[in-house]
Every structure is written in structure tokens, then in C-alpha cells.
Image: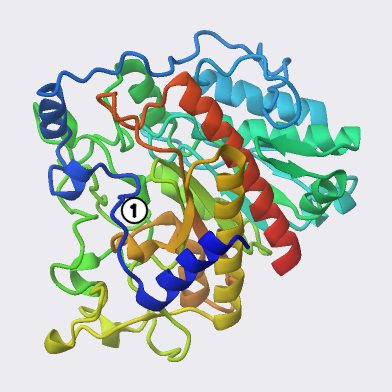
Amino acid sequence: MKATAAISLLWQLLAFEPAAVSACLTAAEMRGENHISVLHRRQRMHNLTNEGTIPIGVGDRFQQGTVLPVGIGSQAPANLTTVYNVVEIESATRSLVREYNLQYFETPFKTYENATMFGIKIPCAATASKAASNASYTVLLEAGIHARERGGPDHLLNFISDLLWAEGHGTGLIYGGVEYTAAEVQKARSVGVVVLPLVNPDGVAYDHATNSCWRKNRNRASASPNDTFSIGVDLNRNFPPAWDYRKTMAPGTTDAISDKPSEIVYRGTAPLSEPETQNVAWTMDQMPDLKWFLDLHSMAGMMLYGWGIDTNQGKDKSMNLVNQAYDGKRGAIPDNRGRGFVYGEYYDPEEYVAATLAATNVADAMLAAGGRNYFAQQSAGLYPAPGGSSDHPMFRALSDPAKHKWANGFTLEFGQPNEKAECQFYPTVEMHQLNMMETGAAFMEILLSAAKLS
């Protein structure tokens, strides 16, 4: 562990100070300017455009799954100057399946625009020759849940290509200033991995077509007439943990979730109301050995570990999200004893150590890979955010321990804001390439941590 990251982590564990940078939300959105039209009017006042950001790919560079994506850590990539479009994301996925004899699967719930979510199962090297039903899958990696956070699916698929190529060639991987040996590649391959490369296909397709900085999905059920910005649900506020925030959270403790469709963090009509989140939950349910979950986001330069609703504690097991006795007390950071908001979410101490070590390893590796500052932090230290995906695998274990094992959940925030763009989530070509280098190192570290700490 690097000294700087260790000091940062220790400070966070002791003080739980909120960070100045917001994950997945711009500063304006965190000030309450959640309506996209308001955000865009403010940005246009500064004469910002999306010119100079990385363009979207045209056609299908992977030729219907017959051409393999090439990752930045293994070989000289053929094309990192455009972002994969939604057709290419599926085509790249199918090419990996074809080349490495992986299992391609489709999730059961169609999106509102009739798209099919898909994924791949990558058994650990020791069981790769066995039937998929006999393989143990302990890690779930996903990307593309927020439409505007460009590059996430590319980074995930290119890393998988890196990993499998390096395994097959008996070699290591290099991500900028970080080098992984062939032995470490084999260690990373000792865990079974499931990948969901595109959680929000409708939203991503719309954002690519419009350059509108679109975050949500495209569900029109709650939209108001003549208000196009009321379309959609924030999928990362639609998971069950503390979704009913007016009941579960202390009043006034979070602006990062809303029950108003016009807001950018609209939670939907019910937990798991959306086919996309139902598909993520369904995928988790197909993984009885799930122990590690990572949701890829941008652009705050952080590796976040749970919980995302309040500070953690490892002493009082009764103080947990499913205990209704604490409803209305969660989310005050720091605790407000005068108002009776004294609460800390229970986190098993052994799992907590594993999660913080893994998060710190990821942050260290990303810093070393690209030279940009990354740090590990508890999600709630940014802002309490009910309904998040990364809390769901832990929440399932609390809700039904007989059925679900505890799984540590993480949100990886790659990259930095593009301050010259109207939509700060759209990177330049150079940013995109640097992001891919850093996320490659991050994925390696999460797999190595899973192999060592599971």
C-alpha cells in the first residue's frame, strides 16, 4: 500500500469527511439543478460545446463478432479514437465469446425500447473446460448504467480481451506505470467472472445520438407531456437499499435521489421497477457464489466501497438497513445527536477489511498506471445515495441471509471531468485512452483481491 493512499484511507476511516468531488453528478446537479434543461442553459452561458470530445464509432468495427477487440494492456490497440456504439458493444462481446469459447447469455427482461441486455460468463481457468453450470462465479463486473458516462463498456470489454489474450499467450500485462506478471494474470484467472457490459442500452443509444448528456434510461411511463427531460429513471437509484428514502432516511440528509420524474436522480415508481435493474438483480441471483461486485462509472477519480447510505460500523449488528427501528435516522453525516440522528450501517469487520484493502489496491494501481490521483473512500462519504447498485449485493444478504451470501459492492469512478466540454462526462480521445489504461489496472486489482481475499 502506498503511503499516500494509506494515509488517505486512514483519515476517511476515522473521520468520514465528505469529499469535495461528486461522483456521477456535476456540481450544479448536486446544488439542486437536477433538471437537464437547466443544466444545459447554465452551461451554454459559458459558450461550452461538446466539440473536441471523442466521437462515437460508426458501423461495426468488429464485423458482427468476427473481429476481436484489442486491449491497451496487451498489444497496440487498433482503434481507441472513437467510443464503441451500442452495436459494437454487442459485436465485441460476441467476438470474445467466439474466440475464447465463453458462454453468452441474455437477461429475461426487455428494455422499454425492446433492447435485450446480454452478458458473458468467464469461468476460472481451473474449471474452464467444465460445463458452465459447474463453474463457480464470484465476481460480477458491469458498465453502462449511466448513459452519459462514455467509455465504460469499452474499458470493460477491452480489459477482458487483455486478460484472456495474456492468459493464452502465457504473458503479463502492462498498464502505463503498472506491470502484471504472467503469474498474476493466472491468479486473476483463478476466479470466475460474469460481465454485463451495457446495463442501459436505451439510454446509451439516445445519448450517442443526441449528445444530450443523458443519464437515465428511456422509460416514458412517468413522463409529463411536452417535457422530454421527465423521461427516464436513474437506474442507480432504482435498487432496493433505502429506496423508500422518505421513510428510511433522516429528513434533509440526501439530495441524491428524487421521486420527481423531471429530476436527473428520479428513483422510479418502485424498487426494481425497471427492466434494466431487474436484469442486474436477476444476474446476481444466478450467481450463488457471488462475493465481489463492481459497477463502473465516471468521472470522479475514486474507488468507492459501501455502504452508500451512512457511515459504517462493525459493533452493533442490529443497526442495519432492514431494521425498521432505525427508519428516519439514517444519512446524517456526521451524526446529529441533537436531533436523534445517530446511526451507522453495520458492516462485518472481516468483510470491511477486505473491501477497504481491495479499494485501496485499486486506487493505488490507477494512480501508478496513469499518474492521476485516485483514492479509496466509502460511498456515503461523498453523499448519502439510496437505491444504489453497489449496496444491493450486501442488502440482499441482510434481507435473506439463508438465500444470499454477503458480497462486497464497489463503485469505480474512472477519469476526471472534461472541463472544456458542455457535458463533462464526454472525454477527449486522450482522456479516453488514459481512462482505459487506468481501468485496466483497476480490474486486475479487483480480480487479484477477489482471488486473495475471498
Q: Residue 59, relative to residue 283: is it above or below?
A: above
Task: Give the quarter of the figure containing the C terminus.
Answer: bottom right
Q: On the rendered structure, is 406 left or right of 220?
A: right
Task: Give the quarter of the figure containing the N terminus.
Answer: bottom right
Q: Nearer the viewer, residue 136 or 124?
A: 124
Please provide percent x and percent y for residue 101.
82, 33
Please provide percent x and percent y for residue 322.
38, 79
Q: Residue furthest top?
A: 59
Please provide percent x and percent y for residue 35.
14, 38
Q: On the rendered structure, is 433 left or right of 169?
A: left
Q: How many marks?
A: 1
- Residue type highlighted by circle 1: Asn
Query: Can you see residue 84?
Result: yes
Circle 1 — which element?
loop
Q: Residue 296, relative to residue 187: is it above or below?
A: above
- Dot 1: few (<14), some (14–19), or many (≥20) neighbours within 10 Å? many
Q: On the rendered structure, is 144 left or right of 336?
A: right
Residue tagged by mark 1?
A: 238
Please provide percent x and percent y for residue 3.
57, 63
Q: Residue at x 68, y 22 (%)?
A: 69
Query: Can you see residue 304?
Result: no
Q: How is the image coloured?
A: rainbow
Q: Residue furthest front?
A: 3
Q: Nearer the viewer, residue 73 or 103?
A: 73
Q: Quadrant of residue 76?
A: top right
Q: Residue at x 9, y 23 (%)?
A: 45
Q: Quadrant of residue 56?
A: top left
Q: Residue 252, relative to residue 198: is it above or below?
A: below
Q: Nearer the viewer, residue 38 or 266?
A: 38
Q: Residue at x 35, y 84 (%)?
A: 323
